[in-house]
Amino acid sequence: MSRRGDDTTTLETGFDRHSLALEYPFTITRGTQTDAEVVTVRIEDADGTVGVGGAGPSPHYGETVDTVEAVLPELLGVVEDVGDPHQLARIERRMHETVNQNPAARTAVSIALHDLVAKRLDVPLYRYWGLDPTETLETSYTIGLDDTETMREKTETALERGYGTLKVKLGTDRDLEIVETIRSVAPDVRLYVDANEAWTPREAVSRIDRLAEYDLEFVEQPVPAENPEGLRYVYERSALPIAADESCVTLEDVPRIADRCDVANLKLMKCGGLREAIRMIHTARAHGLQVMCGCMTESNASIAAACHLAPLLDYADLDGALLLAEDPFDGVPMPGGEIDLAGLERTGTGAGR
């Protein structure tokens, strides 16, 4: 599609759907994935500069690749109508007015626009935002649920690849055994666990008491998001810090969880775009929370952009592309999980082919 904008800029837009195999089946308490279903957005200016963005929708939040593809023509129509990719605030506002829900779809367009704008200015995205690339951190690498021996083997492989921060999925009747096994294999890594809403409040407090001896950074989403008082109950009694993920979806959620957790976990696919993610980070800081940026299983068409937020974060869980068997997009270098913004040789987000 193509349309002349308000100024002299002409933008060509389009999108593609991809099914990307995971290196291993990835299981959490809600089910198992073998593929990452994603949609890639392209926005090209009259000089041939192309911005790339990606959507990794989650059915848990009501989105699929089908819903993303259904609304993208309207969202990209807004981009073409405005015409000037640098008018990020105006485009964001109009996209939200046009498609109020579907945050993953809006995020894909947001990322593609930021990628295009930074490339037009010949700078990497972190520099466009005025961030220091040396103030970065290491992403965690996730060990999905499996039988205990397989989880041990996956941990050994992660250590061989140099990952020094691991996130372990829990929510089974053998959670203590899993953590004990992984700690025996990886005694020195930074380690935190994610129950993905699997526990009751009382069960969570009891399990966390026993897990605390394994030197965990924090416990992520111990109880269902639909039970905010349960989250408060756990937070007030927990022997470990608590992170909120499913309880922290949009900007409006941040004040609601401020007295119920220690860490707010934002995700681009939940919040609807890069500008909104930055607002969530600053709002969380204003409420005294630490901040993590997580992800779904995604390609570097979206993960790369999230990596540029690293200087603003306390924790990064941006391993979505690392879990793929093969990614058609390059991204920010992450040797051993270290988000190396200074080593990025491309402008924009770095999500080239």
Image: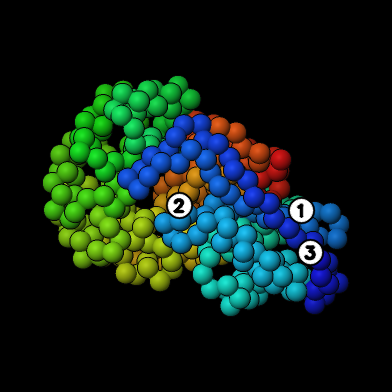
Crowd class of label 2 (few under 14; some 14 to 19; many from 20; radius 10 Å): many
Q: At 43% across and 27% down in the image, what residue appears?
A: 158
Quadrant in which residue 326 is drawn: top right
Q: Which mark is residue 50?
A: 1
> Is residue 131 positioned above or below 178 on the image?
below
> Is residue 5 positioned above or below 53 on the image?
below
Image spot of residue 15 (x, y percent): 69, 55
Q: Which residue has dot 3 on it?
A: 1
Query: With 31 as the anchor, is 323 left or right in this view?
Result: right
Q: Quadrant of the C terminus?
A: top right
Q: Amino acid at mark 1?
A: Val
Q: Is the C-beta separation of discs 1 and 2 under 8 Å?
A: no
SS for dot 3 = loop
Image spot of residue 104 (x, y percent): 54, 59
Query: With 352 as the anchor, is 194 left or right in this view?
Result: left
Q: At 73% across and 66% down in the image, what residue appears?
A: 85
- Of tags 1 and 2, the one toward the viewer is 1
Q: Nearer the viewer, residue 4 or 244?
A: 4
SS for dot 2 = strand
Q: At 46% across and 62% down in the image, what residue appears?
A: 62
Image spot of residue 122 (x, y percent): 75, 52
Q: Which residue has dot 2 on it?
A: 293
Say whether disc 2 or disc 3 marks the residue closer to the N-terminus. 3
The answer to whether residue 207 of the structure is visible from this angle is yes
Q: Amino acid at mark 2?
A: Cys
Q: Amino acid at mark 3?
A: Met
Spatial CA distance of label 3 from label 1 is 14 Å
- Of tags 2 and 3, the one toward the viewer is 3
